[in-house]
Amino acid sequence: MSGTLQKKNFLGQEPVIPLLFAYRSHFLYLFFRLSAIIICCLCITTTCLAQDFSLIHSGTSYDAFENPVQQSFIQEKSKKYSLNILPSISADFAFSGDAEASFKNLIFGEAIRTSNLSSDRHNLLDADFNLYLIQFRIYKDWEYHKEMGFSLQVRNQTQGDVPNSTIAFLNNYQNFNGGNYSSVFNGVARNQLFYQLGFSYRENYNKKWAFGGKISFLAGVLNTDMEVERSSLEVFDDRVSARFSGRYNSSFGTQDLEGRTFIPSLKNPGASLSLGTSYTTKNRFYFSLNLKDLGFIHWGDSLSRYRLQNTEVVVSTFERNSIQSDFSSNFGRAIKESQESGSGTSKLSPQLTFAVSKYYGPYHLVFVLDQFVLNRQQSRIALLNNYNYRRISFGLNGFYHLDHGFNLGTHFMVKSENTEFYIGTEKLISSYALGKSFVKDDPSIAENSPIAANIYLGLNIKFGRVVNSPPQADFIDGLNDEETGYIYRLNNKEKRSIRRRSPKK
């Protein structure tokens, strides 16, 4: 197969069957459907969202949970406990390649255009979703600035490498003239949804060095992993025949997803570890290094495995209006023949993040280098420019992603010793264009904008007593009557005895 894909269908008209509704059982339906949902969430959601990249070295509670070496309390000013008022969500999406225009038509529910698509080109899809249901943090010790925290998250990770030829076929098989075509469906698609219950701890080693760690228990919910290594397509007057070689693993098989599928359980356990260290120079340059999400999920016996060994799917073209739907159903039936149930293990996407920052009066400059450990192509560089005026901070940030190019971001933050509120985006222009297109229901607004979106927003408060050091302390743990332990609670006699032994104020 070479050249450009044919645009007209057998009636001489442009295809009008959207991929989203034409191919419901195929793994790509899950990807595109999920991506469309994420874009909708990014553009029209009203819940609190947060993103970890722009908040590096921000001193927020979110930053302390993502990088466990970070401090979130200020001695003599902050209160002892920290809690998120609303769930905090990190959401990021990017789609790049020749089929950007076709993908825009998909998410807006319009017909997919397949003209000017080079048949041997691929498209990259990346989507990450991180929902913090609970962020609870405690200040433990003034001398070494010990902090510990508990968190509960819901996370989704999606990656895809989809060829133009797959999109063209799923839209309308008539985009292919009669004959034989190779590598039409070659691609990779992965999706993983899980819950994460974490415990984090940090402390200062001395005035320069600090260390922190976060250990998490994971509960897997959904897992889809498909790779087509070899494929072919034959188009005849009366039928279409496709062959696949590769693998397909799924935690839900070929069944439709139900609401109870998303309820967490212990059937698919896992664990992850995050480690961080920081160093402060005499000139007040602050360096940090963080290894995040080094972990795995063990999927139980419910995991379905399918071996695609020249698996053939044949569909008659007499019912031309439903050929894509029939192809979808026949594909599901064909792979069922090779179904095997068994356990399996999937990896998370660990990240290694290096950051250095310094305050120049009200100006806070942060340089960030981020690398996905298992994928050398997924590297990010950021320069965060934050200007602080009293309790208000404004940011204009630049980001470069090796796969998806340059993006400009901005944020607004109100941060005091006991309250933090922030809102922003790391993909300013594309997020605005897509959001306005959804609100106005006008796809032409985002016509010349990249398919990428990001938004973050969060609200946290601190409560309890102020965390003072001994010279200024009104209350010191272990010395005051209220903190004498369980004996104090036994009876009134013990209470009176302890009061007599305690120094008078």
Image (tube, grey):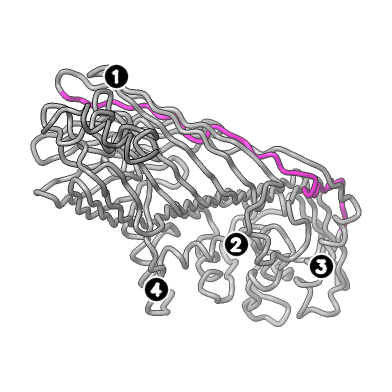
State which tag comes first along the sequence, 2 or 3. Answer: 2
Return the residue at label 3: 329
Residue type, label 4: Ser
Q: Is residue 137 left or right of residue 344?
A: left
| Cα–Cα span, label 2 and label 3 | 18 Å
Q: Are marks 1 and 3 in contact (CB under 8 Å)?
A: no
Cα gap from disc 2 to disc 4, whole angstroms: 19 Å
C-beta proximity under 8 Å, tags 2 and 4: no
Whether residue 153 sits left or right of residue 473 in the image: it is right
With respect to residue 376, does 46 lie above or below? below
Residue at mark 2: 32
- Magenta stretch: give its range: 284-312
Could you say which is closer to the camera, residue 175 or residue 360? Answer: 360
Where disc 3 sits, the SS reads helix
Mark 4, residue position: 437
Question: Quadrant location of the N terminus?
Answer: bottom right
* Labelled disc at residue 209: 1
Q: Is residue 153 left or right of residue 20?
A: left
Q: Nearer the viewer, mark 1 or mark 3?
A: 1
The first of marks 1 and 2 along the sequence is 2
Closer to the camera in the image, 96 or 127: 127
Q: Residue at x 60, y 65 (%)?
A: 33
C-alpha distance separating marks 1 and 3: 59 Å
Q: Where is residue 11, by image quadrant?
A: bottom right
Q: Residue furthest front?
A: 493
